Structures are given as structure tokens and as C-alpha cells.
């Protein structure tokens, strides 16, 4: 039975790991002197277009404002700017007072090479990004005062960057909503789907010429399509197709097949090592894609790097270790289906690294065939003559399923990528409290000194990254904002490091220079015209002191004892978007920077310490201000929610009159 989904043969270069050559940036400059010069913007004459002229100015600008920086590396004290306010003098555990602005030097690593196998797994990457966001929200909720988030290796950070780069969030969202839009009892016989740049297609096992709106059927009635801009309600109810999972892509789009529609075991044949990589990718996507709901995945014979990673995942060395559990759940599902209680059904998917003993195979085959669209699917690396479908993988990475007329470049994950994914998910699972007696917020290390009154502030707190000048947001495109954010967070960096982070798919050297000139043009628009990017003779890039990051300003102000001013920065912050996802395909490098992992906890600890201080002063009104400021950035923090509740309970009528003025 062919579903006619694929029009063209698959192109394995689109999805097979390591097959595609990526663009690089040519080295710029050679090691040389230490003097930095401004990277100049090209200012075109009216009616002219910017040209490719090289940078010619090398004079370092004189600040001329006499301001002293708040040195976040411990080399100086903050200037006295702004109104005087109460200082918070945090003490170290040994009782010694820490100097203003004293923060240890940052230790960082260059970005690791991206795992392109994950970049090409678009639906899996989207599910992983969502899973990471959920774990971070849970971590923020559960984190006690002083707990630390464990650091991650560059190779693990590269997995997060790859997921952000590869995730097709809009395609996954449309597919999820499209799968759930059918009223109960009217579910079509979808056997496969394809996500295209401008639409989503469903392939049906039998013709149906009357699809619900806004779907459209082709002349055969076996293919329904839905444009990407279709208006559909938000996802609701259980997904009717939890077994729909990616196999790879053809030249038109991303191809998915419903494993539950097989009605029998599925074999995957070819090189044993390569087929295991394909099976691993299928298992992980089953676990994390948006429409998985409460399914269960059982992996047998793949080793235990994923063990105890998720309560819905079971890992075992032998089928005998899990067969009883699988049979019991299969019987329960069968009874629920035959009794008309579909909400009690928990679909399960077995992925086996090798054929099981024949008795076990026959038992699994019987379970799968018990019911139409049985809530169990079995995928086995290896061949059995009773397999209902067979996925054939050739040496070039092309996967064929002849019963479905499918030909795709196969999706696969290497063992290293799978291990790094597991390590990343565990690292995001929680924070560790090393010293329960900790009373002092520990500031993150910063990569550069912090000027207290910059002309340009890179805002990463809140919903959308922005560049702000003295009079409001600057007119900057997303790429320019990301470049400035990267330079602010990394400190001095090379063009190669910048390109690898902001343009992970590769960028021609000329395009990178154009992007840098655009950044210089944006920063040139400040009143002094001194904010910008410095370039050193060896090609290293850095920002001038006039450009600072809101994260760094927050830390420096807190270390200088100006905590109320730091918290006041958060009042204009828009709360993070639900799910906490970064902008699509951008800022994947952020997870790998140490400060991105320590900053949320530090902010929560600072706000909590201020709440305790204000309550001790008898000023619950100011405690409410502090807790509310922290919750604008960390809305799931249970510590801050408890602080807010305590402050509200402590309020008395005189506090309502006093408002939120200075403490008495």
C-alpha cells in the first residue's frame, strides 16, 4: 500500500550527520600589539550604497567624561553616580567584608563544534528546546537560596546551541495543532505527514475527499494539506497521533510516519551501527516531541546513558527485564480500548537494538495486533519475516519503506550526541545546595569591567533582547543585537568565535564584515558617538565601555552595595514569554556561558536577601517591591513567591500610606 507522500528521491546530504560542508570565516589579522581601534561604520552619502571598504581608523577614542568604571574584576570602586541609597554590605563566610565591585575573573571556553546530526533533526530539536525550558522553569521553582546550577562542558553546550539552531518551532506548533483539531470520533486515517516550508501535508491510508476546513484534499483524496498561515485553535485534549515521528527528509520537506499505524512490528535493516543511530533518534523524538503527551518509551540494548532521564523512559539491557511490564500495560490498554475508555490508554513504544528471542517477538507481535491502531509499537534493529513494515537503510544514509513508498535522507543521532543530550538534560534538572548555611548571594564572574552609566545597554532581561540608548530602544536588527550581546558576554573575542556563535551555519567573511559595520552604524547613533566595537591588531574584537549588558550592570550594582538601584532596573522588564524559549534559531550559544547559568539564581538570591532585610526593618511595602521585581524575571521562583506572600501578610495600614519611599 503506497501513500504517495514522496515525490522525489531523498537527498541524504540534507540530514545524514557530517555529510554537508559548512562555510568558514577566514582568519583575520595576526597576533600583534595590544592597542584597540574603533571598528568604523560606513556612513553612505545620500543615495549611495555602502561599499566594501576596509576599516582604516585606528585611534582609540578618549572617553573624556572622567567617569570611573565599576570594575567587576576587582580593580576599582564604583563612581558615585545617582542619589545616595542604603548600602548592603554582604560579608564573606569568614566574616571579612568584600570590597565594592570585587568579582572573580571569568573562565570560559571556546564554543565546541556543533553536532549537525541534531541540527538536522528539526522536530526532535524543537522538542528538546521545549524540554529544556520546562526543566529550567521547574529548577527555578524548586531552587533554594544559595543553590548552584552545575556547569556544563563545551560539548554539552554545543548540543543546546544545535537544538536552538535546528528547531522548527513554527512547523512543530502547526503540526501539533493540526493533529489535535479533529473532533472526537472523526480522526482521519493519517499514516504519515510532511512538514514543508509553506504548509503541512497529511497522507491517508484510504481516500477521503471531504477534509474539515481549513484542510484541502488533492484529487486522490489521500493527501490533505494545510498552509502554515492557517488559523487553528491552540492545542487541546490528547494527541490522537502520539506515534507520528520523523524518519528524515526528502527534497520537499520533513517526513514523519505514525508507527502505531503499522499494526505489527517494524524492522530497520542495514549496517548495524548506522541503524542503531536511526533508532536512537526515533526513540528520543518519541519522548520529547510536542504531541507525545503521556506515552512511554522502552529502549532495550542501547546501553544506559539515557537511564533515569525521564519517568516516561525505561532503559534495559535485555527484553526479559521489561517484557512483564510491557505485557501488563498492553493488557490494560486493550481492556480500556474495548471498554470504551480511551482516556485511560497509555501508548508505549519499544525500540530494540537487536531482534529479541523468538518467543518474546511473538508475544510482542500478538500485543501489537490486538487492536486497530493498537497503543503499542515495536521497532527492531534487524529483520524478521513477520515484520509489518521494514525500513531499509543504505550505505549513503537513504532510508526506504517500500510499503509506504517512502524514500528519505534518514534522521540519525550519533552516540556522542545522545550522551551529550542526556548530560544536558540532567544538568538542567536541578540546582545543588553545597552549603545550607549560605547567607550571602554569590555574584557571577564577569568577563569585563562595568561602567555604571553606559550610553548603550544590551537588555537580556525579559521577553525580547534589545539595545537601549539614552532616549529609548535603538533601531537595531536582531543579528546586530545578538552580535553586541555576544561581545558583551564574552568580552574580547575573535571573529571566528563570533561567527561560530552567531552564524553557526557558516558565513562568508565579507558578510561578517558587513554585519560588524552595521553594528558600528547602530552604535554610532548615540549622542557621544563614542560607543562602538574595538578591533585590535591581532583581529580581536571587543566593545567600548560605553556599551554594557544589563546582567553585568545588575551584578556590579549589587556588589557595590546599590541593590535597590539594581532591582529598580527590573521594573521596566517585560516578563519572559511562556516556556522561556530564546528567539527561534538565535542565542543557542547562551546556554554555554557560565553567567547564563548562574545569573538567574543570583538574581533570586539578591531579591530574597532584600526582602528579608526589609521585613527585618519593618518595611513589608519595600519587601513587596523587591519580591515583585525578582518575579518579573523569574516568575516561577517559589522562594520569591513565598517572600511576596510573607510581605503581603506583614502589611499594615500605615504601610499603605508610606508607599515605597526610602526606609526610615
Image: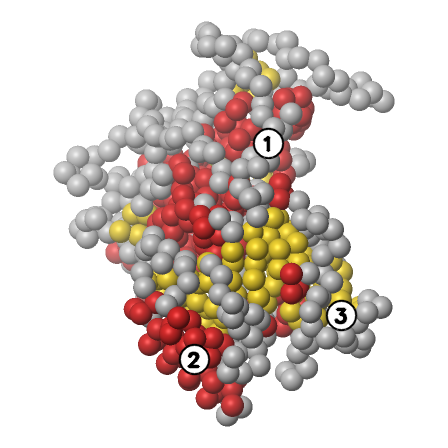
- Residue occupied by mark 1: 21
Q: Is residue 174 shown left or right of residue 452?
A: right
Q: Is residue 13 shown left or right of residue 380?
A: right
Q: Residue at x 50, y 18 (%)?
A: 540
432 vs 530, nearest the viewer: 432
- Please tell me the numbered disc located at residue 484: none
**Residue 124 versus residue 459 in the image, above or below:** below
- Residue occupied by mark 2: 330
361 vs 650, nearest the viewer: 361
Q: Is residue 206 shown left or right of residue 441?
A: right
Q: Quadrant of residue 528?
A: top right
Secondary structure state at the residue bearing disc 2: helix
Q: Residue at x 51, y 46 (%)?
A: 118
**Residue 293 versus residue 488 in the image, above or below:** below
Q: Quick one: which residue is furthest to the bottom in this view? A: 339
Q: Residue at x 39, y 66 (%)?
A: 356
Local crowd at mark 1 within 10 Å, few (<14), some, or many (≥20)? few
Secondary structure state at the residue bearing disc 1: loop
**Residue 274 image offset from top left, x and y in percent:** 48, 48
Count the labels in the image. 3
* Contact? badges 2 and 3 (CB < 8 Å): no
* Residue 542 appearing in the image: no
- Please tell me the numbered disc located at residue 222: 3
105 vs 354, nearest the viewer: 354
Amino acid at each position: 500500500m503506497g501513500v504517495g507522500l514522496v515525490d522525489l528521491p531523498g537527498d541524504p546530504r540534507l540530514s545524514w550527520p557530517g555529510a554537508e560542508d559548512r562555510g568558514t570565516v577566514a582568519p583575520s589579522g595576526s597576533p600583534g600589539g595590544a592597542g584597540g581601534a574603533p571598528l568604523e561604520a560606513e556612513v553612505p552619502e545620500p543615495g549611495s550604497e555602502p561599499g566594501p571598504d576596509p576599516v582604516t581608523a585606528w585611534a582609540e577614542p578618549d572617553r573624556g567624561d572622567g567617569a570611573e568604571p565599576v570594575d567587576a574584576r576587582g580593580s576599582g570602586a564604583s563612581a558615585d553616580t545617582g542619589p545616595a541609597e542604603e548600602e548592603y554590605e554582604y560579608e564573606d563566610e569568614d566574616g571579612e567584608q568584600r570590597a565594592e565591585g570585587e568579582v572573580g575573573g571569568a573562565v570560559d571556553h571556546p564554543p565546541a563544534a556543533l553536532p549537525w546530526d541534531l541540527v538536522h533533526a528539526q522536530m526532535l530539536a524543537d522538542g528538546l528546546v521545549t524540554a529544556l525550558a520546562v526543566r529550567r522553569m521547574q529548577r527555578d521553582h524548586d531552587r533554594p537560596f544559595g543553590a548552584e546550577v552545575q556547569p556544563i562542558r563545551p560539548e554539552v553546550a554545543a548540543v543546546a546551541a544545535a537544538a536552538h539552531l535546528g528547531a522548527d518551532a513554527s512547523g512543530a506548533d502547526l503540526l501539533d495543532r493540526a493533529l489535535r483539531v479533529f473532533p472526537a470520533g472523526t480522526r482521519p486515517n493519517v499514516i504519515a505527514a510532511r512538514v514543508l516550508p509553506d504548509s503541512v501535508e497529511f497522507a491517508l491510508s484510504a481516500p477521503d475527499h471531504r477534509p474539515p476546513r481549513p484542510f484541502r484534499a488533492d484529487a486522490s483524496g489521500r493527501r490533505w494539506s494545510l498552509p502554515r498561515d492557517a488559523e487553528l485553535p491552540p492545542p487541546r485534549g490528547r494527541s490522537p497521533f502520539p506515534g507520528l515521528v520523523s524518519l528524515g527528509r526528502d527534497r520537499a520537506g520533513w517526513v514523519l510516519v505514525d508507527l502505531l499505524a503499522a499494526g505489527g512490528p517494524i524492522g530497520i535493516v542495514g549496517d548495524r551501527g548506522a541503524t542503531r543511530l536511526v533508532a536512537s533518534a526515533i526513540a528520543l523524538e518519541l519522548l520529547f516531541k510536542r504531541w507525545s503527551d503521556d506515552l512511554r518509551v522502552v529502549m532495550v540494548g542501547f546501553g544506559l546513558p539515557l537511564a533515569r532521564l525521564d519517568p516516561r523512559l525505561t532503559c534495559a539491557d535485555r527484553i526479559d527485564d521489561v517484557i512483564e511490564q510491557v505485557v501488563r500495560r498492553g493488557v490494560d490498554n486493550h481492556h480500556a480500548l474495548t471498554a470504551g475508555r480511551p482516556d485511560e490508554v497509555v501508548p508505549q513504544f519499544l525500540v530494540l537494538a537487536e531482534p529479541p528471542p523468538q518467543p518474546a517477538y511473538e508475544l510482542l507481535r500478538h500485543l501489537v495486533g490486538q487492536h486497530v491502531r493498537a497503543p503499542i509499537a515495536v521497532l527492531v534493529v534487524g529483520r524478521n519475516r513477520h515484520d509489518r513494515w521494514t525500513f531499509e537503510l543504505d550505505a549513503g544514509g537513504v532510508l526506504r519503506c517500500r510499503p509506504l513508498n517512502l524514500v528519505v535522507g534518514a534522521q540519525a543521532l550519533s552516540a556522542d550526541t545522545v550522551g551529550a543530550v542526556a548530560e544536558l538534560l540532567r544538568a538542567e534538572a536541578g540546582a545543588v545546595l553545597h552549603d545550607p548555611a549560605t547567607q550571602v548571594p554569590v555574584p557571577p564572574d564577569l568577563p569585563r569591567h562595568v561602567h555604571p552609566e553606559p550610553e548603550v545597554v544590551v537588555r537580556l532581561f525579559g521577553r525580547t533582547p534589545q539595545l537601549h540608548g539614552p532616549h529609548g530602544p535603538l533601531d537595531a536588527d536582531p543579528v546586530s543585537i545578538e552580535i553586541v550581546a555576544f561581545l558583551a558576554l564574552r568580552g574580547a573575542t575573535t571573529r571566528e568565535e563570533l561567527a561560530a556563535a552567531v552564524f553557526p551555519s557558516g558565513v562568508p567573511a565579507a558578510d561578517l564584515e558587513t554585519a560588524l559595520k552595521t553594528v558600528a552604524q547602530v552604535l554610532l547613533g548615540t549622542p557621544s558617538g563614542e560607543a562602538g566595537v574595538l578591533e585590535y591588531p591581532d583581529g580581536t574584537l571587543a566593545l567600548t565601555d560605553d556599551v554594557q549588558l544589563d546582567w553585568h550592570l545588575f551584578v556590579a550594582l549589587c556588589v557595590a552595595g546599590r541593590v535597590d538601584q539594581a532591582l529598580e532596573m527590573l521594573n521596566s522588564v517585560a516578563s519572559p514569554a511562556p516556556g522561556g524559549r530564546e528567539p527561534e534559531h538565535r542565542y543557542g550559544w547562551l546556554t554555554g556561558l557560565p553567567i547564563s547559568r548562574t545569573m538567574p539564581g543570583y538574581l533570586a538570591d539578591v531579591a530574597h536577601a532584600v526582602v528579608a532585610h526589609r521585613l527585618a526593618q519593618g518595611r513589608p511595602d519595600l519587601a513587596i517591591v523587591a519580591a515583585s521585581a525578582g518575579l518579573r524575571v523569574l516568575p516561577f521562583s517559589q522562594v520569591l513567591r513565598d517572600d511576596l506572600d510573607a510581605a503581603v501578610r506583614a502589611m499594615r495600614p500605615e504601610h499603605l500610606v508610606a508607599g515605597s519611599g526610602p526606609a526610615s
